[in-house]
Image (cartoon, rainbow, N blue to C red):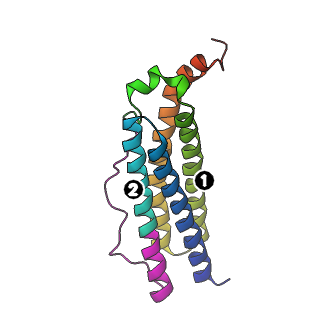
Amino acid sequence: MAHSETILHGLRRAIQGEADGYHFYKIAAETTKDPTGKEQFLVLADEEKGHMEFLKAQYKSLSETGVVDFTVSLGNEHHFTAHGPIFSEDLVGRINESQFEMSALSIGIKLELVSIQFYREQAELTDDADVQKFYLDLVDWEQEHYHSLLRQQEMLQDAFWSKGGFAPF
């Protein structure tokens, strides 16, 4: 596989990964009963869709011209925050009824971690500094998602285990 074909193959896989994330977060938003969670899952879906559109534009540019399209960007703002809660306080009160939300957090964490690892690998596989940069920018975005989801899971874990009878508290 030629160097440019290796890059294009990686971009196709990245686009599919972002599409998977987009659809998962859309389903999570539609399924959760928590209004704050619904809003945050929609923000995540929107950011994943933005990543997908960015990658599609880069794929098109690289396949047609052989160079990165600098007119397309991921954007500067992360709307999904690592600091605030993803779910409302009400969710903690009904945590034993929140298996879906806990599962969604767990799956989201895994999706983000796989994306981080994949983008790092792709950045290492190419000698093209521009391609490396956009992959590393994606690592930063996905790390923010990962840490946000992990922080929320850790905040809810003790209450979930205790009320669900999973831990000997």
Q: Is 86 covered by the magenta stretch?
A: no
Residue behind mark 2:
46
Q: Kindly identify the residue that appears in the image at 58 percent across and 66 percent down.
A: 122
Residue at the image position 50 percent from the left and 85 percent from the top = 63
* Element assignment for label 1: helix
Q: Amino acid at mark 2?
A: Asp
Q: Quadrant of residue 167?
A: top right
Disc 1 residue type?
A: Val
Q: Position of residue 83 (x, y in %)?
A: 37, 36
| Residue 133 x/y as whole percent | 45, 66
Q: Can you tell which of label 1 and label 2 is closer to the viewer?
A: 2
Distance (Cα) linking label 1 and label 2: 19 Å
Task: Single out the residue that lies furthest toward the bottom.
Answer: 65
Give whichever of 52, 31 is nearer the camera. Answer: 31
Instruction: Give the residue at the far top of this rendering.
Output: 169
Residue at 33% across / 61% down in the picture?
75
Q: Residue at x 51, y 26 (%)?
A: 156
Q: Position of residue 29 (x, y in %)?
A: 44, 45
Residue that badge 1 annotates: 114
In the rendered view of the protein, which quadrant contains the C terminus?
top right
